[in-house]
Image: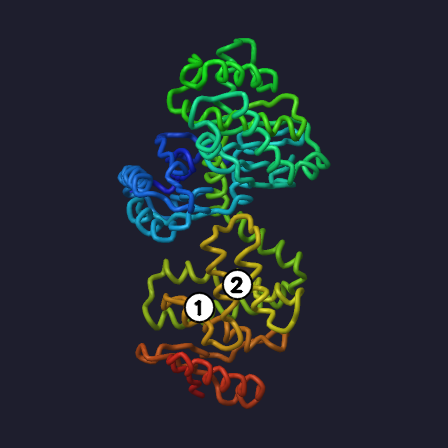
Amino acid sequence: MTTPNILASVDLGSNSFRLQICEVHPNSQLKVIDSFKEMVRFAGGLDEQKNLDEASQKRALECLARFGERLKGFQPEQVRAVATNTFRVAKNITDFVPRAEAALGFPIEIIAGREEARLIYTGVVHTLPPKGDKMLVIDIGGGSTEFVIGSELQPALTESLPLGCVTYSMRFFSNKISQKDFQAAITAARNEIQRIGKMMKRSGWDIAIGTSGSAKAIRDVLAAENPQTHDITYEGMKKIADKIIQAGSVKKARFSGMKSDRIEVFAGGLSVMMAAFEELGIEKMTVTDAALRDGVFYDLIGRQINEDMRDQTTKEFQQRYHASPNQGKRVAAAAQKFMESICHALNAPVQELSYWQQYINWAGMLHEIGIDIAHTGYHKHSAYILEHADMPGFSRKEQHTLSLLVLGHRGDIRKMVDLVDDQMMWFAILSLRLATLFCRARMPLELPPYTQLRSDNGNGFILRISQNWLNEHPLINGALGYESEQWQKVDIPFSVQPQ
């Protein structure tokens, strides 16, 4: 078993998979004690239908198994594995992820593009303090490119576009490279960047910073060609492109500053970077070694010291959609009490209860955000927002879980039958439904002593509650009768047992 101050991040990119292990020192300083990188070329396994072929899956699973061997002895709270663009776009990824998690030994979070951008920026801002300068950060990955602008700990703008060194190399540079190929790649990338260009230029920046493999490879080649060069410039990139075109391939150009594992994907990354310089009017770019994995570490540290980005996002969503924080707190607190009661009765593991209590809290705080769209069927609007919105700190799987909880918290329970396949999810949905039922008056409400939610020998649920209290709250008493009818529809008996 490893010590608690040892953390690990797993970055499953479209080009390479990385495992980094760090020791956390006082003041959240990180010391790298081990790192592994494998060029899996995951995006290279996508066919025209966006399905991953068997060869790419095999390479990925073998790599993850090796990572898993190194991570033996780590606790779940010490490891965070994030997956990026290829995991987002692959049509058959749902079948692959369980195999990947089994090989690694830890859950894998598929993060949205803007969440990837936020984590990249988090890594940059913690390792390269801006000193008040507004930064434009560009990270060219294997399948996507992230653009971020910010000067504080949290970014002001985050964008992710489907431009990658692997995908562009495969699309435009699979044969002998010509001037026409380079121009086609740059034009295609500029067309994508144009979508965000006006907004980015309106915001403005003081310095441009490149991160990750493509930016570092371009910098290294430029430095090898001209030792006085420390930054990336358009003129420098143009000379590199001309040399590649003249030679006909990156390999034949024989760049002394290029690592062998970058040769196959260098032209794609170079064309995307040139397009970014052209479209955004960038004059020069500094390169930092900070990357997504660093942001994952600092985000993980924040969760351990109760500075969880997910809590901040929850508060921001309440404000954005004008949801009552007080009502959210009431519902969340009541739902957590019901969930705790039933889990204790079933002797559920403490870790599992803690896991679901977290989701119940977020769901309770956010269950009414859809009211800002329409009161009728607001739970459906809330669920849609939670499923599809950019929510910094949350993975797609976490958003899906929240969406299901909120969708099920009111209305006909039959809609959840084909969506829920986990017993604990049913417990959480019932807890949230009861909480909203008891808190419907939107006023402080104390549940009577000895109120308990219990399992009826695995055949359903029993709510034990004071008969006198029910007599004093006839509306809630009537609503509990309706709730009992709802659970009968899905063959999960729910009854009230007055005390």
* C-alpha separation, residue under disc 1 versus residue under disc 2: 10 Å
Q: In which quarter of the image is the C terminus?
A: bottom left
Can you tell which quarter of the image residue 414 is in? bottom left
The amino acid pointed to by label 2 is Ala
Name the residue located 46 percent from the left edge and 43 percent from the top edge: 300
Q: Name the residue under label 1.
A: 428
User: If you read the primary sequence from the N terminus, does the residue marked by circle 1 or circle 2 appear first?
Assistant: 2
Name the residue located 57 percent from the left edge and 15 percent from the top edge: 236
Name the residue located 49 percent from the left edge and 89 percent from the top edge: 467
| Residue found farthest to the right | 202
Residue toward you, 40 or 378: 40
Q: Where is residue 234 in the image (x, y as percent from the top left)?
A: 61, 20
The secondary structure type at the circle numbered 1 is helix
Q: Mark 2 points at which residue?
A: 363
Q: Is residue 132 visible?
A: no
Q: Residues within 10 Å of mark 1 (few under 14, many from 20)?
A: many
Q: In which quarter of the image is the N terminus?
A: top left
- Tag 1–tag 2 contact (CB < 8 Å): yes
